[in-house]
């Protein structure tokens, strides 16, 4: 294994999207998003490769180079997508790791597909990694990969980062074949989480399930040391700042304000349409405020961007129906011709449009029932160079640990959601500015590039890396 790449990222998705060029031909462009912008420069300068799926079923795209990164596609059949991705990943692990806010579904054939696909990812990685390379595996779709990879290539340094919460021991124990999943993660040298509590849950589980004896932030397993630590992820602050300073984005923001009614205060939600994001509860709380007369259609307007996501999974279709019924009801009851209280967009928007919305907003609503971090909250704060705007933030997001100057709410309690929304609307401008300044300082001090470098420095040497 002399050849190969000294740094390999392994993630369910490749960091590219297929687009159609002006000549009608297919081409690959780098996907937007903080993770890709943080890792792309590191991958490029260290001669790196990226192992992942193209996002299309039965796609036989071969190795590619995009933007100086070597892409190594792992093909998935339509059945793999159905069973490994939509099944075991998104209908079993996702709801269980998010505190059972929906009921996980357990199917033997999904688990088998998950294991088979994880093995293919591990094999593809083993083939491209150089001797002694550093490999960074990402997220809940690939929990088995670290151990599989270690057995194929004991020479590698393997890091794993989980983007979603890691559940308490009692919840994890419900998973069929739970010990295999835990052993999968223990194949890594470093397991990174969004929050310290998640790292603690993981270490406790290692004690409970395998009888290991964790001490501090590590555990000894099969003669190796596995370190578990929190690395709260962040955003590309420079990129959001650049968009927020762009005159076209600012113009778009003014146009949005004018279209919605300059005299109305704008509340905004931006989420993938996912039951973990608390969209339903948020819309319900807004409806109750209108019903009670605490706010009126002439004074406020809610824009909810609900980006389509996992629409082949039944629970997501049902959520869509419930949200759309409630939005229709509220607009029917409290709207007027040419003026509705809820603007609901079941659409994906460009980063420019999202930042224009952030700039136009009075009160940003980020109220997930459970969320590993939540980048939207950080993007909103980074966009507000004017130091205006208030953030209502769920206590159950990773972001709440850093952004405790937000108006914190418990989204499981509609009364508390309403209280938070009203407090944010009513707060004096000085108070909002103080809160925003403090939150901006936090986000500016921790950008995604620093996150990636800290993780990799710890993987390189856990005792030397600053924490
Ligand atoms: C997972 C974890 C963790 C949203 N709509 C559009 C769009 N977005 C962008 C946002 C933001 C990103 O997608 C969403 O990130 P979140 O962190 O809010 O949520 P998840 O997708 O659930 O992410 C989460 C994250 O991983 C990173 O570790 O924070 O806890 O669940 O950047 O701006 N982007 C575009 N159009 C849209 O319509 N272009």
Image: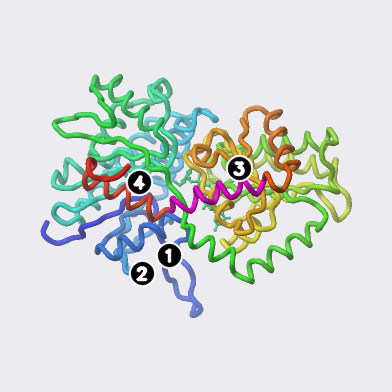
Please name the residue that numbered disc 1 is placed on: 30
Judged from the image, the secondary structure of the residue bearing numbered disc 2 is loop
Compared to residue 448, the image places residue 25 above or below, namely: below
For discs 2 and 3, the disc positioned in front in the rendered view = 3
Using the image as rendered, state which of residue 185 and residue 25 is in the foreground. 185
Badge 2 vs badge 4, beta-carbon distance below 8 Å = no
Few, some or many residues within 10 Å of mark 2 (<14, 14–19, 20+): some
Q: Is residue 241 left or right of residue 126?
A: right
Please name the residue that numbered disc 3 is placed on: 366
Badge 4 or badge 1: first in the primary sequence: 1
Q: Position of residue 32 (x, y in %)?
A: 48, 60
Q: Quadrant of residue 279?
A: top right
Q: Residue at x 83, y 55 (%)?
A: 263
Disc 3 C-beta below 8 A from ligand 1: yes
Please name the residue that numbered disc 2 is placed on: 67
Judged from this view, the residue extending furthest toward the right is 337
């Amino acid at each position: 294994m002399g050849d190969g790449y000294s740094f390999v990222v392994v993630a369910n998705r490749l960091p590219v999207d297929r687009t159609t060029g002006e000549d009608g031909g297919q081409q690959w462009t780098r996907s937007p998003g903080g993770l890709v912008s943080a890792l792309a420069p590191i991958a490029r300068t260290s001669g790196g490769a990226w192992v992942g799926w193209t996002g299309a079923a039965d796609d036989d795209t071969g190795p590619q180079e995009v933007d100086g990164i070597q892409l190594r596609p792992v093909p998935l059949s339509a059945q793999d997508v159905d069973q490994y991705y939509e099944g075991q990943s998104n209908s079993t692990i996702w709801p269980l790791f998010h505190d059972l806010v929906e009921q996980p579904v357990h199917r033997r054939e999904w688990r088998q597909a998950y294991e088979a696909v994880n093995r293919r990812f591990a094999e593809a990685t083993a083939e491209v990694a150089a001797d002694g390379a550093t490999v960074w595996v990402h997220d809940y779709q690939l929990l088995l990969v670290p151990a599989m990879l270690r057995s194929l290539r004991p020479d590698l340094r393997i890091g794993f980062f989980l983007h979603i919460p890691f559940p308490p021991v009692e919840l994890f124990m419900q998973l069929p074949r739970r010990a295999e999943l835990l052993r999968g993660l223990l194949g890594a040298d470093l397991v990174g989480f969004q929050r310290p509590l998640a790292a603690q849950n993981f270490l406790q589980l290692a004690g409970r399930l395998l009888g290991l004896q964790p001490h501090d932030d590590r555990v000894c397993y099969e003669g190796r040391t596995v370190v578990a630590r929190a690395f709260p992820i962040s955003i590309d602050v420079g990129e959001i700042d650049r968009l927020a300073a762009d005159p076209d984005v600012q113009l778009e923001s003014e146009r949005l304000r004018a279209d919605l009614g300059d005299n109305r205060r704008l509340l905004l939600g931006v989420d993938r349409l996912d039951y973990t994001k608390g969209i339903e509860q948020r819309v319900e709380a807004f409806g109750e405020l209108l019903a009670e007369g605490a706010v009126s259609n002439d004074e406020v307007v809610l824009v909810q961007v609900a980006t389509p996501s996992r629409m082949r999974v039944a629970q997501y279709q049902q959520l869509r129906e419930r949200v759309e019924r409630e939005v229709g009801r509220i607009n029917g009851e409290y709207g007027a011709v040419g003026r509705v209280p809820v603007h609901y967009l079941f659409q994906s928007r460009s980063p420019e449009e999202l930042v224009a919305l952030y700039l136009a907003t009075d009160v940003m609503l980020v109220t997930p029932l459970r969320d590993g971090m939540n980048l939207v909250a950080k993007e909103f704060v980074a966009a507000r160079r004017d130091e205006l705007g208030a953030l209502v933030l769920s206590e159950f997001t990773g972001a709440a640990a850093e952004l405790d100057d937000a108006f914190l709410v418990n989204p499981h309690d509609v009364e508390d959601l309403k209280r938070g929304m009203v407090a944010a609307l009513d707060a004096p401008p000085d108070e909002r500015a103080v809160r925003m300044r403090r939150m901006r300082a936090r986000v500016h001090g921790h950008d995604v590039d620093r996150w990636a470098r800290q993780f990799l420095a710890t993987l390189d040497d856990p005792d030397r890396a600053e924490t």
